[in-house]
Amino acid sequence: PCKPRVEDCTCRRGVLALLRARHVGAGSFLARRAPPGARRPPPSSMRILVVSLELVTAPFSGNGVLAAAQAGALAAAGHTVCVLSAAPAGAARGEPPALCRAVEVGVPREAWGRLDASGPWREFASGAADAATTIAAAPPDIVLAVDWTGWLAAAALKAARPDAFAQVPVLFAAFRVHSRTDGAAAVMDAETGAMRGAAAAAALCAADAGAL
């Protein structure tokens, strides 16, 4: 596949516009009957799955904070948002962003707190695959995969249930370009794979967009 153009999305509106540009039909969502008294979603509403290693429980870097803010802003804009993230063993469960549904997978506590190749990315991807059937009950219209770890987890999810996710586009959101500072093969291969396989890509600044 061709390498997607990397958009410099420094705000929620930029990412939301990119999501809408890459979205393919939300008929199944719009056909659902709203409960009595509920506000009808706007015509452009989507079911969005945000996949981020850290988000709900024990976030440890700006990635988790930004991913949570992004998910909450998309939900507040009228979209149906599910977040898929990891949780270190034994940690007290956190609160998902307002209006968001959360699915968490357990990872080793000793590996928590790292975004490089020594972190729990393998366990997160494995857990995402295990959660595929749960998420397939209400499949997303689009996936927002945060960084290389989120891309691998999204890929594992799609591979586990191709019947539900094969046609779902994935937006690669590079909150940080890890290959600029981490030369580990896992990181390099994941970011390269994301740039080849994503329907679109977004970075937080022009320098990161250029690096991808």
Image: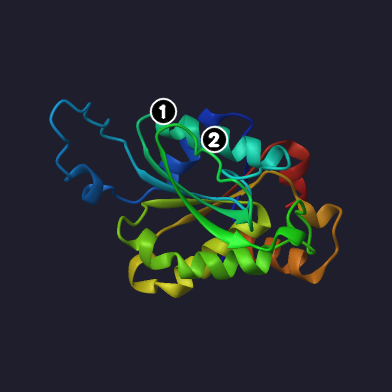
Would residue 109 appear left or right of 159 to someone viewing this image?
Answer: right
Q: Quote the CA–CA distance across marks 2 and 1.
A: 10 Å
User: In this rendering, is residue 110 above or below 96?
Assistant: below
Give me the residue at 41% from left, 34% from top: 75
- Asked where in the image residue 81 lies, by quadrant, the reply is top left
User: Could you tell me if the residues under marks 2 and 1 are in contact, i.e. CB atoms within 8 Å?
Assistant: no
- Asked where in the image residue 115 lies, by quadrant, the reply is bottom right
Task: Answer with mark 2 or mark 1, whichever residue precedes in sequence.
Answer: 2
Image mark for residue 204: none
* Quadrant containing the N terminus in the rendered view: bottom right
Residue 89 in percent (x, y) is at: 64, 58
User: In this rendering, is residue 30 above or below 151?
Assistant: above
Give me the residue at 80% from left, 57% from top: 179
Q: How many marks?
A: 2
User: Which of these two is toward me, 111 or 25?
Assistant: 111
Residue 113 in percent (x, y) is at: 76, 51
Q: Secondary structure at mark 2?
A: helix
Q: How is the image coloured?
A: rainbow
Pointer 1 residue = 76
Q: What amino acid is found at the position of numbered circle 2 in the picture?
A: Gln
Characterize the local packing of mark 1: few (<14), some (14-19) or many (20 or more) Cα atoms within 10 angstroms: some
Give me the residue at 32% from left, 37% from top: 45
Pointer 2 residue = 70
Characterize the local packing of mark 2: few (<14), some (14-19) or many (20 or more) Cα atoms within 10 angstroms: many
Residue 101 in percent (x, y) is at: 41, 44
Tell me if I can see residue 146 in this picture.
Answer: yes
